[in-house]
Every structure is written in C-alpha cells, then in structure tokens.
Amino acid sequence: MVNVDLSKKDSVRQEKGRKTALKSDLIRLSDFHYHVHSQTTKRDYDVIKTNGKWSCSCPDHRFRHVCCKHIHSVEYSIQLREEVREQKKVVLSPVTVSDCRFCHSQNIKKHAIRHNKTGDIQRFVCGDCHKTFSINLGFEKMKSSPETITNALQLYFSGESLRSIQQFLKLQGVTVNPSTIYRWITKYTKIMKEHLDKITPQVGDAWRADEVYTKIRGEMKYVFSLMDSETRFWIAQEVLDRKEGADASSLFRKGKEVTQTKPKVIITDGLHSYSEAYRKKFWTVDRRDRTLHIRNVHLQGDMNNNQMERLNGEFRDREKVVRGIKKVDSVIIDGYQIYHNYVRPHMALDGKTPAQACGIDVQGNNKWLTLIQNAKFSSSDERGGYAR
Ligand SMILES: [Zn+2]
Ligand SMILES: [Zn+2]
C-alpha cells in the first residue's frame, strides 16, 4: 500500500531526526548502540544496529515498524560527521620528484650529486623557482637508506625485538647495532610527533579513557589513554607513576587541545581520578553543553572494551621483546600512538587507519616515509613557497 500521506509523515520524521541530531539529544555508546532522548515523551530510547539495520525501542518503531525520528537522527548525525570530515580533510602525500617541492612546477632537472658514505644523493633543481632539493628528505646525513630505517620502524612497532630487526637487516646486507636502531626509532618518532601534533583529527563525540600498566625506563608505569570510540583514534596519553590518586585532568586537557573540542560522552572505569578530572575539564554549569560521564559500564556488544584490550596487548608484547636495550623512553609510547593512529590498518574500520577515519589521509605505500617527509618538510629551512 503506497500512500502519499505516509511519505509525508516520513519526511516530517526525518526533519525531527535532523533537529534531534543537531540539538545533541543523542549519545553514542558504541558502533551499534545509541541513546536518543525524546523531546516529546522525555524518555530515552535505544537505537541498536543488528545485521546492518537500525532498530529503535520506541513505540513508533516497535509497533508500527516505521523508520522513526530516532533512527533518522542517528543516521543523520553519522552523515553529518562524514561531511565535516570530508570538508576538513587533510592529505599527506609522498614527496616525489615528478614536480618541484616548492612551486610544483614540472620543469625540474637533475642537479649536483652529493656523495656520502652510503652512496650518492641526487639533488634536483627547479627551472622556475631555481630552488634545489633532494629526494632524501628527512634522511640527510643518515648512513642507512630511508627504506632500511622505515622498515625498522615498522618491525619495531609491530612487535619485533631490536635484536631480530638487527638480524633481519643483516640478511639484507645492512649491519647496525640494536642501539642504532633504537636511536632511529626515537629520532623519527620525535620528528613525526611534532608535525602530527599540529593536525586536528575529526574525532567522534564519545571517548573512552583507560589505563595500561607497562614498563618504561625499567620502572612500571601507568599509561593513561584517551580514545575515540568511533574512529579508534588514540587521542592522548599521559604516563603516570600510579593509578590511585593520579591526576587524570591533564589527559583530558590534552584531549581537548588535540581535538579542539570536547566529547558528549566520556566513558571510564570507576577510578576516582576520572571523576575528579571530569569535574575539572568536562563538567559545565550549562546542562546543554555538559559532557556526560558514564562510569563502569559493561554494555552488551560494546566494542570499547575490546579497543583498550588491544592496546593493552600491543604494550604487553613489547615488554617481552625490549631486552636488547635497558631503558625504554616514554617517547616510545608516542611512537606507538603514531603507529596505531596513522600506520596500522584497523579491521573494525574496514582496513582504514584511525587517522583516515578522522579525515587524515596519509598516502603512499610506505606511510612512515610519507609521515617523515611531510614532517621534515614543514619544519625545514627549505620551506620557501610550499603551500599544498
Ligand atoms: Zn524510535
Ligand atoms: Zn620550483
């Protein structure tokens, strides 16, 4: 039975759904679960996704099987976020020699060859702006090639020990000490971090905070982490000595700085530190602007717990294989954060990286290389007329 009136009602519901989405009466609990507050009945409804379809606990949906305004508001809010991400998209592309790094002219020629221990470095000159550059951006004066170094980064953060990386490189004819490999890792992590800190990820509005126990510089420490539940972006971390009585407010402050926003919901365990940090950083007098704090939740089918378990796993593996070197700096945690956000494809995101899900596209087959080149380029003296 097709009925004009019905479709009219449907568009009214869509419109109401849009308003609900904009008025932030909607709370994301997981990929498959939203709470929507009804303005008419003053009740909360559960909008849940099963087998790719949304259903709602409101009477409209349950008894009349219509796509209610609550479902519309969930769909609309997802669409809205996608649009924002598309508008604010950041692309980091590999630096190639097909065009001038400064003015993007195609009119480039081979220039001088610079000799160093590992071989020759070709420099190029632009026929239009006359600037010169090498393709070795970020790896100048290094004794090993960009490929060797980025291979080592990838192996380390995916769980290999420094010794086994050393052996792997030896098979490829490269002889280095574990301590050299460790220096590469810290050096390039710092370079990448400085650049990536300037980029704002378009995260979702439900975050999760949790803490992981790990060994840093030979001592057991807690890594407090803040993660976006929708995109899995690891927003911020703070290394602290203890769990009880720790001050988590600087974690929340960092989260606000990194994202330039605050979440609608923050989900934490029952740790007192979070309640205190919440009051300092997220609570507002105005109810409409206030972040909701959910403590100790164990929702059925909730993905959030798994996200943190995974992170736990990433660190725990590390403890076993770090023996080659005595002290592990907290800079290594920054490296993990970069690997997690920008390099490692995530199954729950259809193979995208969390950064990609936040509208930051790191292009090229070797993402480490792209990240280092871009970081180095934005900080180098050669900056000149670069605007991409
Ligand atoms: Zn409904
Ligand atoms: Zn040029």
Image: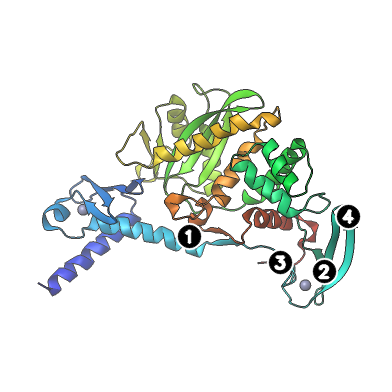
Disc sitting over residue 214 in the figure: none
Instruction: Name the quadrant where ligand 2 sits.
Output: bottom right
Tell me how far mark 1 sits from mark 2, CA to CA: 36 Å
Task: Identify which amino acid the numbered label 1 is placed on.
Answer: Arg
The answer to whether residue 98 shows anywhere in this view is yes
The local crowd at label 1, few if under 14, some if 14 to 19, many if 20 or more residues have their Cα within 10 Å, is some
Q: Tell me what residue is drawn at x 77 percent, y 49 percent.
A: 173
Q: Is residue 331 left or right of residue 277?
A: right
Residue matched to label 4: 116
Residue of label 3: 96
Give the residue number, with chain letter if any, for mark 2. 124
Res 44 → quadrant = top left
Q: Position of residue 62 (x, y in %)?
A: 14, 52
Q: CA distance from mark 4 to mark 1?
A: 43 Å
Residue 83 lies in quadrant: bottom left
Distance, label 3 to label 4, CA atoms, is 21 Å
Q: Are marks 1 and 2 in contact (CB under 8 Å)?
A: no
* Picture coordinates of residue 287, whole percent (x, y): 35, 42
